[in-house]
Image: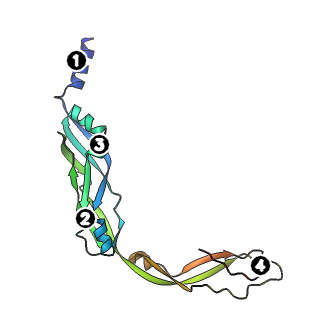
Amino acid sequence: LIAVFLWMYVMNSDEIEGTLTYSNIPVRLDGVSTLRSNDLVILSGNNSKITVECSGKRKGLQTVYKDYMNIITAKVNVSNITEPGEYELVYDLSKGETDISVVSKNPSQITLVVDRLSTVSVPVEVQLIGTPADGHTISECVPSPDAITVRGPETILRQIEVARVTYDVTGLTSSLQTNVT
């Protein structure tokens, strides 16, 4: 019985030091609107999460643990990025008004890949599938418009050769003008 009370006293003591790991803390990106105004976009790294190991009094560590996603925050300012590329950025870590200390953070920095937003015109191609009804044929298929404008990251736009629309003509028995996406 004495051992149980001693154990309860030790576990609830404010003076016992310990460490605790807080995982999956999202890194908030500040200045994204500045990137967009400079026609830049983040391709990867915008959903970075970190793990932080902290030390302190056990009771304080456990109090923080109950709501650590709102107490421990990580953020990095991206408004000074002016060109496309890969960036290794050190984030700022805040632990609110707590008495805990950061022992380690993993990773210590995040990697962002930034690309320039661009616009390109690509031709529209109609791909017909199926077969019209017996005795009927397809004589002409003309897309309108014959090209569309696409906006996005340059590296992705370079891979686009054509905008293809597929239309099923199975059982078609008459001339048809239709809208398809």
Q: Label 1: which residue?
A: 6
Q: Residue 151's x, y, as percent? A: 43, 77
The residue type indicated by label 3 comes to Tyr
Q: Do the residues labelled 1 and 4 touch (CB within 8 Å)?
A: no
Q: Nearer the viewer, mark 2 or mark 3?
A: 3
Q: Label 3: which residue?
A: 68
Sequence-first disc among 1 and 2: 1
The residue type indicated by label 1 comes to Leu
At mark 2, the secondary structure is: strand
Sequence-first disc among 1 and 4: 1
| Distance of label 1 from label 2 (alpha carbons) | 49 Å
The residue type indicated by label 2 comes to Glu
Sequence-first disc among 4 and 3: 3
The residue type indicated by label 4 comes to Pro
Q: Residue 96's x, y, as percent? A: 21, 45
At mark 1, the secondary structure is: helix
Q: In which quarter of the image is residue 75?
A: bottom left
Q: Label 2: which residue?
A: 88
| Distance of label 3 from label 1 (alpha carbons) | 29 Å
Q: Residue 133 carries which label?
A: none
Q: Do the residues labelled 3 and 1 touch (CB within 8 Å)?
A: no
Q: Which of marks 1 and 4 is in front?
A: 4
At mark 3, the secondary structure is: helix
Sequence-first disc among 4 and 2: 2
Vertical placement of residue 130 versus 105, above or below: below
Vertical placement of residue 101 versus 167, above or below: above
Q: In which quarter of the image is residue 85?
A: bottom left
Sequence-first disc among 3 and 1: 1
Q: Which residue lies furthest to the right in this view?
A: 135
